[in-house]
Image (spheres, rainbow, N blue to C red):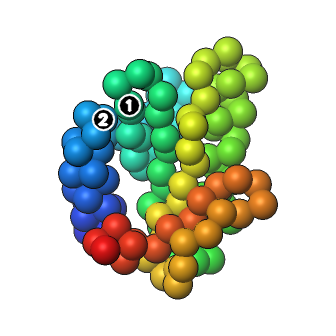
Amino acid sequence: MAGEVGVARDLSIYAQTFGAKLFHYQDYRNREIDAVIELENGDWCAFEVKLGANQIDAAAAGLLKIRNQIAAEEGGKPPKVLCVICGLSNAAYQREDGVFVVPISALRN
């Protein structure tokens, strides 16, 4: 939990530098996203925060599922970026499914 709070703080500071806002997302279908950055033009990015690298696949699958449900099933505006922020990842990279994985330490550099 402390890691999520720190990540949320860092993301909020970064978002403010370009006029964006940070939110937590949970809807009536009980779908949840740890952090959402919404840009002034309505575009948004979804972030899941996980401590272990063994949680990356599940977090990415969850983000992809929510994106697909919002876009295909509900006709909503899907997120522009999907990202898993991970405590135990050594490097930032983009997975084959398009989800970015970023180590927590990269937020502080």
Quadrant in the picture for the N terminus: bottom left
Query: To which quarter of the image does residue 25 belong?
Result: top left
Quadrant in the picture for the C terminus: bottom left
The residue positioned 25% from the left and 64% from the top of the image is: 6
Q: Earlier in the sequence, mark 1 or mark 2?
A: 2
- Side of 9 relative to 54 (left or right): left
Query: To which quarter of the image does residue 96 belong?
Result: bottom right
Looking at the picture, how far across and down is residue 99, in whole percent? 65, 55
- How crowded pointer 2 is (Cα within 10 Å; few <14, some 14-19, many 20+) is rated as some
- Side of 46 relative to 68 (left or right): left
Question: Is the Cβ of the residue at disc 1 closer than 8 Å to that at disc 2?
Answer: yes
Picture layout, residue 9 above or below residue 85: above
Query: To which quarter of the image does residue 37 belong?
Result: top left
Looking at the picture, how far across and down is residue 30, in whole percent? 52, 34
- Side of 37 relative to 52 (left or right): left
The amino acid type of the residue labelled 1 equals Leu
Name the residue carrying label 2.
20
Most extreme residue toward the top is: 75
The residue positioned 73% from the left and 20% from the top of the image is: 73
Q: At numbered mark 1, what does the secondary structure look like: helix, strand or loop? A: loop
Q: Nearer the viewer, residue 22 or 1?
A: 22
Instruction: Identify the mark at residue 39; answer none if there is no mark.
Output: 1
